[in-house]
Amino acid sequence: MADVFHLGLTKADLEGATVAITPGDPARVERIAKLMDTPKFLVSTREFTSWLGYVDGKPIVVCSTGIGGPSVSIAVEELAQLGVRTFLRIGTTGAIQPHINVGDILVTTGAVRLDGASQHFAPLEYPAVADFHCTSTLYQVAQQSGETTYVGITASSDTFYPGQERYDTYSGHICRRFSGSLKEWQQLNVMNFEMESATLFTMCSALGLKAGMISAVIVNRTQQEIPNESTIKAAEGKAVALVVKAAGLLA
Ligand SMILES: O=P(O)(O)O[C@H]1O[C@H](CO)[C@@H](O)[C@H]1O
Ligand SMILES: O=c1cc[nH]c(=O)[nH]1
């Protein structure tokens, strides 16, 4: 019987892992785990797919969070109940600065809280910041890999379409709150959009847990809206390899 409500995991399944790699996409979990030693499938339920692997003899759990803050908050809470203290998110992302290219790597230091779930952990005045040690480790492995890497702020939105000011939609309508927001984030030196870091960082800081995020740029919003499959796979592959290295160093 599982020890937690949603993930279908027991404490024993984690074999003492204190570090988790948390991609959004369940399909990314096996790809990550297979870069580690003795990868083992644990369980798949709803958006949460979990595998366990070892790096330098240290257990690392890989668990997908699904899309958005609410499901991240469930995954983090339940993994923490099972003994995890450090969370490394590896995501795909849309760059909004013209100089950031598809295939580049981003390490996020802090998130603009365009989500709702983070407010269930701390008021809006509270910053959504990554853990310094996680961030510096992610940056170090990215730098050493030779990949073009940027470090900075991410806008983290509950919605993929209006919250990221996309007009290629069914209605083409954006409410006033988000109309012009992409340009404003650009001017404020925000690097990119994604959908989980605001909840992840706020909740982890508030609960005394550690979190970091690395992402792979799959689209540049100043140039295009729809990425192609091979671009996604290639960009994702780079970030996946980097997060496994960082997890090994942090475990
Ligand atoms: O690739 P993942 O980790 O899912 O991350 C990004 O991709 C999803 C949207 O397509 C959102 O979850 C966003 O944060
Ligand atoms: O533009 C993008 C690409 C991936 N994920 C997002 O949330 N936004």
Image: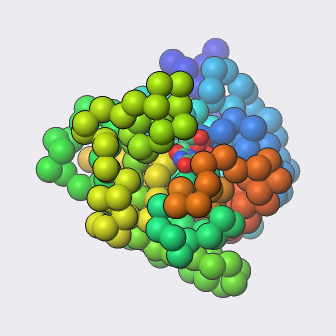
Residue 251 occupies which quadrant of the picture?
bottom right
Could you say where residue 161 lies in the image, as x and y percent from the top left?
47, 36
In the current view of this chain or complex, which residue is farthest to the top? 1
- State which image quarter holds ligand 1: top right
The residue shown at (67%, 21%) is: 45
The residue shown at (58%, 33%) is: 66
Q: Is residue 55 above or below residue 116?
A: below
Quadrant (top left/top right/bottom left/bottom right) for the N terminus? top right
Residue 88 occupies which quadrant of the picture?
bottom right
Residue 42 occupies which quadrant of the picture?
top right
Could you say where residue 117 lies in the image, as x and y percent from the top left?
33, 33
Could you say where residue 9 lies in the image, as x and y percent from the top left?
63, 27
The residue shown at (51%, 18%) is: 5
Q: How many dots with numbers?
A: 0
- Is 111 left, or right, of 245 in this rendering? left
Q: Is residue 206 above or below residue 222?
A: above
The residue shown at (46%, 52%) is: 193
Residue 193 visible within the image: yes
Q: Nearer the viewer, residue 99 or 75?
A: 99
Q: Is residue 200 above or below residue 5?
A: below
Q: Is residue 105 above or below residue 211?
A: below
